[in-house]
Image (cartoon, grey):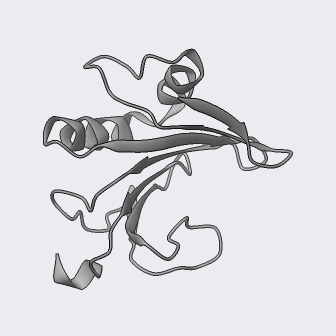
Amino acid sequence: MAVQQLGPNTVSVNEIAWDGSGFGNAKANEFWSQLSSQLQKIAISELVAGNRPRSILRNDSRNIIVLSFSSPPNSLKSTTDLLRVHTEFKHGNYCYDGTACTYEDLESGDFLAFDTTVPVHDL
């Protein structure tokens, strides 16, 4: 696991692995504890289903956590009053090239990001 400073306001922990109760890295676990409970529940479902976490980061200027997975989501969620699903890039939504989609918690601003080489409409 590598902790990286990605600019003046963002810290990332890469090459993370879930051990059933945490990531085995103090910084990654600190970020996990700050991730919204709604996204933690979705993330645990993804982890149990075998989706591998890729990285977790904290952006201090936006006061958000982003947990990235290495594969598309096992079940694509729909936008609700509390969750917005992004399937294409718009400024600030962490949905970049190679990202199937992101889930944004509308209360906290936190995200789950899911990587893919398959367009999300093919899921």
Residue nearest the viewer, comparing 70 with 21: 70
- In the rendered view, tell whether residue 66 sits above or below residue 117: above
Q: Residue furthest right?
A: 8
Q: Residue at x 55, y 64 (%)?
A: 94
Q: Residue at x 25, y 35 (%)?
A: 44
Q: Quadrant of residue 37?
A: top left
* Image coords of residue 115 (percent x, y): 37, 63
27 with respect to 46 (left or right)? right
Q: Classify residue 68 as left or right of residue 79.
A: right
Q: Where in the figure is residue 49, as x and y percent of width and height?
A: 13, 42
Residue located 18% across and 83% down the image: 122
Q: Quadrant of the C terminus?
A: bottom left
Q: Nearer the viewer, residue 63 or 48?
A: 48
Residue 60 image-quadrant placement: top right
Please provide percent x and percent y for residue 75: 15, 59
**Viewer-side residue, 16 vs 10:** 16
* Residue at image point 70% right, 38% down: 4
Left or right, 5 with reference to 90? right
